[in-house]
Image (cartoon, rainbow, N blue to C red):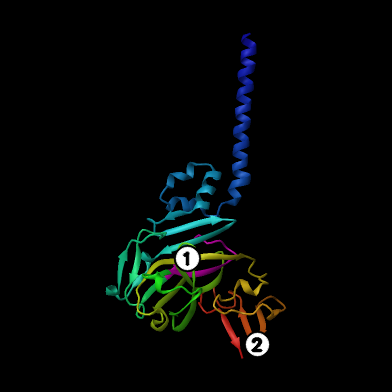
Amino acid sequence: MIWDDNISILNSFNTLSGFHFSSLQEDSEIWEPKLPRDYNEIIRLSETPEMHTKKKKDIYKKLSNGIFLQKEKVWLLHDNGKTNKMISATRFSYENRESHKWKSVQKSRFRTVAKMLDISNLKIKITMDTQFLSPGVIYGAHLVFKFCDPRKFSSKPLYVNLKYRNRNTTLHSYFATWRDDGWMMIELCRFLHPKEDIDLEVLLESFSRYYCRSGAIYIQGIEFQAISNVAHDDIKNQNEVENSNSNMPANSEEIIKRSEHDELSFWLREVYGKKRLTLSAKELGLYNSPPIRWKVSLL
C-alpha cells in the first residue's frame, strides 16, 4: 500500500514536471520570438518594471495592448511583429511660451496635451527619436492634433497646409485625416528604419489661417505608424514610401532601376507626362544625417 502511494506521488510529480517543462518550452520557442528585440529595455523603462519576472506570453499580451514608458511620455504598441510609438507633446520645445497652455482633454493617449492659441505662429521644435521601432520597417511620422472646436470642420480629408522646416528646407503637408478616436493626423515624413536608432528634427511653423480659420488646436504628440515590413534592398511597392498627400493614380507606370552593384535603388515613374523619382532612404543619407524630404520630381 505504501509502495502504491509512492508510485502515485512520483507519477504526479512527473506530470507536473512535464507540464512545467512544456510551459517553459512554449514560452521560449513560441512567445519570446514574437517579442521586440529590446523588450527587456522596454520593460525597464515602463511603469511596471517588475513585469520582467512574468512569462513571455504575458509580456507579449501586455505589449500588444500598449505600454507607457518614461513617466507616461512615450507609448508603445507591439503587434504583428512591428512596434508603433507615440511621443507626447510634453517632450516638444516651444519657442513662444505664451502661445500654448497645458490641458487635459478626453480621448487623449496622454494625460496632458498642448493647446496652441495661435496656429499661424506655432514655433514648435520636435526631436523624434526612433528608439524601439522595428528595423527594416517603413514608418510614417504623423502629427496628432485636433481643433478645439471640431464642429467647424467636417471634410475628410481636411486641407490644412501645415508648414514646417527641416534644417534649412521649408516643407508643406497639406491634408489631415480623421482618426477613429476623434483626433486628426497629418504625415510629416516616411522613412525606412535601419538597425541603428536615429533622430529626426522638424520645426512646426504654421497651419493655414485661410483654411483652418483662427481656431486653436490641441496637439497630442507625434506617432510613428508602421507601413510595411520590407528589406532595405528589396522595396518594390512604390505606395509603401509614397507621400500620403500626393494622390498618385493607380495606373502610373513604374520602373525599378538598380545599378550593377546595387549602390543605387529608386523608382522612376511617369505620371501625367511627368517623371517622378523616388529614392530609397539609403540614397538620401538616412544613416548619417536623416532628411525629411523624400522625393525629387523630374519635369
User: CA gap, disc 2 to disc 1?
Assistant: 33 Å
Q: Is residue 106 above or below residue 150?
A: above
Chief secondary structure of the magenta portion: strand
Is any part of residue 264 visible from this angle? no
Spot occupied by residue 118 in the image (x, y as percentages of width and height): 33, 77
**Secondary element at image label 1:** strand
Is any part of residue 268 visible from this angle? yes
Spot occupied by residue 244 in the image (x, y as percentages of width and height): 55, 75
Q: Is residue 81 above or below residue 269?
A: above
Instruction: Give the residue number, with chain letter if any, for mark 2.
Output: 272
Q: Residue at 48% of width from left, 41% of height from top?
A: 53
Instruction: Give the residue number, with chain letter if any, for mark 1.
Output: 223
Mark 2 and mark 1 lie on one chain; the one further toward the N terminus is 1
Magenta extent: 127-144
Q: Are marks 2 and 1 in contact (CB under 8 Å)?
A: no
Q: Nearer the viewer, mark 2 or mark 1?
A: 2
Q: Is residue 205 magenta?
A: no
- Which quadrant would residue 6 be assigned to in this image? top right
Total marks drawn? 2
Specify the quadrant that holds the N terminus: top right
**Secondary element at image label 2:** loop
Spot occupied by residue 255 in the image (x, y as percentages of width and height): 71, 80
Left or right of 222: which side holds 273? right
Q: Is residue 198 above or below residue 3?
A: below
